[in-house]
């Protein structure tokens, strides 16, 4: 099965899908080893870890693809990639979708912010007009149908820029165009979250960004509201930063950090055991 086919099979099974988001090959492997069925390459997290820059459109599509190829090669679970605005007009959107498919992604998220975009929980002020938003999703869907196969996640940030009713209208229009997964960024409360799922039929994704705009709810409650995919975009990044800061404080104080995996575990995680076994098949 292709990555997209594996993702479709997960969706067809009808289960609630908890999706920790990754930022590099190692974090993706940890997600897989923890037993989660899929992951998402977070644009915020990749910009932060690869460039130490904010999620404001500064990272290029080439850099995202380079990161994505490494992530997809490191795991067997489906990976969804953040495609931002599609990086231009409908021709650019189609090329971005095709490139993500060739990189090994199972899905790509395309959004309706103006370019340069920014993290949806940091004060989105502008989205493109309806016609341009629909052109982007139509182009992505047509590239999928032309052979890319990759699933299309249609995102709207209109809730922050224009209000709830406009966001709901856009989600419904994206669904009509054939988007596989629907995502309204930054609903304000459970009432808005329920309306998103009940008013617009389809597979919906929730975004659980700690300390963000949307309330953090347990997976069971999100499923009751109607969400099928539950993303945790920055949980791994924020906890990793905290752990590294604690380790650095220990080192600065002259202590060896105690909260760490042992060297044997680290060697196994990056594949030393498998490498040695492979080399052993080719004796001198």
Image: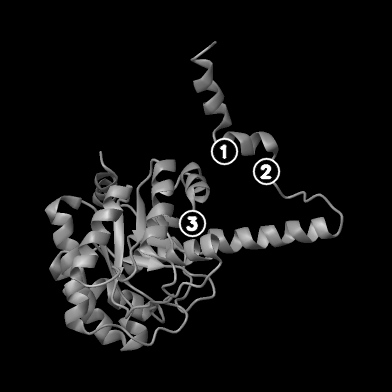
Any part of residue 224 in sight: yes
**Residue 147 in the image: x percent, y percent?**
15, 50
Foreground disc of the pair 3, 2? 3
**Residue at disc 3, secondary structure:** loop
Q: Nearer the viewer, residue 5 or 114?
A: 114
Q: Is residue 177 left or right of residue 161?
A: left
Q: Is 207 drawn above or below residue 189 in the view shown?
A: above
Residues at discs 2 and 1 in contact (Cβ within 8 Å): yes
Residue 187 is tagged as none
What residue is pinned by disc 1?
269
Q: Is residue 259 left or right of residue 209?
A: right
**Can you tell which quarter of the image residue 114 is in?**
bottom left
What residue is pinned by disc 3?
23
**Residue 159 in the image: x percent, y percent?**
33, 83
Residue 261 is tagged as 2
**Residue at disc 2, secondary structure:** loop
Question: Neighbour class for label 2 at 10 Å: few (<14), some, many (≥20)?
Answer: few
The residue drawn where x is 32% and y is 49% is 103
Q: Nearer the viewer, residue 239 or 136?
A: 136
Measure how far apart labels 1 and 3 are at the Cα level: 16 Å
């Amino acid at each position: 099965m292709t990555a997209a086919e594996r993702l479709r099979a997960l969706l067809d099974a009808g289960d609630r899908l908890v999706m920790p988001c990754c930022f590099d090959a190692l974090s993706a492997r940890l997600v897989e080893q923890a037993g989660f069925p899929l992951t998402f390459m977070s644009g915020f997290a990749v910009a932060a870890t690869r460039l130490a820059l904010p999620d404001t459109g500064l990272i290029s599509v080439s850099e995202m693809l380079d990161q994505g190829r490494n992530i997809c090669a490191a795991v067997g679970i489906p990976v969804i990639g953040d495609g931002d605005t599609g990086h231009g007009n409908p021709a650019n959107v189609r090329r971005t979708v095709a490139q993500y498919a060739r990189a090994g992604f199972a899905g790509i998220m395309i959004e309706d912010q103006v370019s340069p975009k920014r993290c949806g929980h940091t004060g989105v002020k502008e989205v493109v007009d309806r016609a341009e938003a629909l052109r982007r999703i139509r182009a992505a869907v047509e590239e999928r149908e032309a052979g890319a196969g990759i699933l299309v996640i249609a995102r709207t940030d209109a809730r922050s820029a224009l209000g709830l009713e406009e966001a709901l209208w856009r989600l419904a229009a994206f669904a009509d165009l054939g988007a596989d997964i629907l995502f309204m960024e930054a609903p304000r409360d459970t009432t808005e979250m329920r309306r998103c799922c009940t008013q617009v039929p389809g597979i919906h994704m929730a975004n659980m960004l700690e300390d963000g705009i949307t309330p953090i709810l347990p997976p069971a409650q999100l499923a009751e509201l109607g969400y099928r995919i539950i993303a945790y975009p920055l949980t791994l990044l924020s906890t990793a930063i905290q752990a590294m800061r604690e380790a650095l404080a220990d080192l600065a104080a002259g202590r060896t950090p105690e909260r760490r995996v042992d060297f044997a575990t680290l060697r196994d995680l990056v594949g030393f055991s498998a490498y040695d076994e492979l080399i052993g098949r080719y004796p001198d």
